[in-house]
Amino acid sequence: MLKPKTLILRTAGTNCDAETDAAFQLAGAETALIHIQNLISGKVNLNDYQILAIPGGFSYGDDISAGILLAVEMKHKLTDALNRFVADGKLIIGICNGFQVLVRTGLLPGINRSGSDTPEMMQQTTLAMNTSAKFECRWVDLETEKSTCVFTKGIKEQVYLPVAHAEGRFTAPPDVLEELESNKQVVFRYAKSEYPHNPNGSDVNIAGICDPTGRIFGLMPHPERFLMKWNHPRWTRLSETERTRSEEGDGLAIFKNAVNYVKSHGK
Amino acid sequence: MQNWKVEVYYKPEVPDTIGQGIVEDITDLGISGVDSVRTATVYWIEGTLDAEAIDRIGMELLADPITQVYTFRSQSDSTTDWTLEVQFKPGVTDAVGDSAVKGIKDLGITGVTGVRTGHKYWLTGNLNAEILETIARRLLMNDVIQTFSYEEPQS
């Protein structure tokens, strides 16, 4: 099969697009960096692609609150294209600012309460200001949950990735949290609940979630910043066994899973 | 043409981490006796918009539905706290205000001509006008581009 086509969405303030592009290319995808205006104008058709990636950054300066302006723009200017993309069973990943966007559009966690086929686009959870009230930039240990997420199928139980955000405290009403657990929508948790291991004070240490189908995935840590072993902050100081174990960084498997999913499902 | 003032602040059960940080910063200034600070972001929306449109703007754009609430009707602040408001001087570029205009237009709402933003603080503790002015000038504003106003507690 041809390489799966991945659209990496850009707008004012996006700044992790090059790394996300590299990640999908290393994973075997064909990629295109597309500005949102080209989707709104119709110059580029979202549905010519199989994977949509919303990268990290500070879209529209994180004005009002992180991700809200891009979320409003996507909800109201790309409604039909997005609905079709989701209904066709295609994949969406939102990293950091992209996760904030997906949460504010309501695509995540996307718990369907109306029984309708199209996504409800109602915000059910949020990523609030970190409890430390400041920007947190550090590497964190993550635990992979047994979830429905197609991006994390078969990956390691313990993953090491960096976070870099000010608004990453995942919080939701108790009934939504319960539903996330029972639907197996919690994908990653910070390995320990104390600060700074849980860098933002997230409820039940949640670092990443997926929608009920497992095809829409959002996470605060940056898997695109750990693609090869040399990205590890202490790679020169790791033991010989750890250093020679794999050329791959922990993050790459997430992008490979996406590419393999598309290849095997022919979306 | 009608101007609306929308205030966005945290629900009572959600910690206002920015406000808590300001309490510590006030202590660092050498001022003791401030017990608590709560914060709000203020949006002055100009144009021909009705209450229904402003309500949508508050709900879908300005306030986070999980952690925040908003008010927009003109109401007098009958509060036992000191209130302090910081806003840009006329002519100073307000980037967040300009972004809010974009967001409002994306919602499909017409008639907005401009948005200006500012911050509001509710303070409790052993305060007087002089202390409040010190806190404003040394911590919460930049005199080159901003102005402030305050109100004493209503008894």
Image (cartoon, coloured by chain):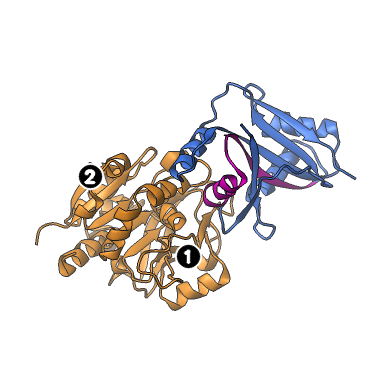
Chain colours: A orange, B blue
Q: Between marks 1 and 2, how big is the CA–CA gap?
A: 35 Å
Q: Chain of mark 2?
A: A
Question: On the image, which quarter does residue B88 sit in?
Answer: top right
How would you rate the neighbour count of disc 1 (Cα within 10 Å): few for under 14, some for 14-19, many for 20 or more? many
The residues colored magenta run: B35-62
Q: Considering only order in the chain, which callout, 2 or 1, is on the residue closer to the N terminus?
A: 2
Disc 2 target residue: A44
Please say whether residue A250 is visible from this viewpoint.
Answer: no
The quadrant the N terminus of chain B occupies is: top right
How would you rate the neighbour count of disc 2 (Cα within 10 Å): few for under 14, some for 14-19, many for 20 or more? some
Q: Same subunit under labels 1 and 2?
A: yes
Residue B79 locus on image (x, y percent):
82, 47
Relative placement, left or right, of A60 versus A65 is left
Cβ atoms at labels 1 and 2 below 8 Å apart: no
Q: Residue at x 33, y 71 (%)?
A: A213
Residue A224 locus on image (x, y percent):
31, 52
Residue A23 locus on image (x, y percent):
25, 52
Please name the amino acid that badge 1 sits on: Ile
Disc 1 target residue: A206
Viewer-proximal residue among B110 and B61: B110
Viewer-proximal residue among A105 and A136: A105
Query: Disc 1 on helix, strand or loop?
Result: strand
Residue B69 locus on image (x, y percent):
63, 53
Relative placement, left or right, of B51 versus A94 is right
Query: Disc 2 on helix, strand or loop?
Result: loop
Viewer-proximal residue among B94 and A155: B94
Please say whether residue A75 is visible from this viewpoint.
Answer: yes
Q: Chain of mark 1?
A: A
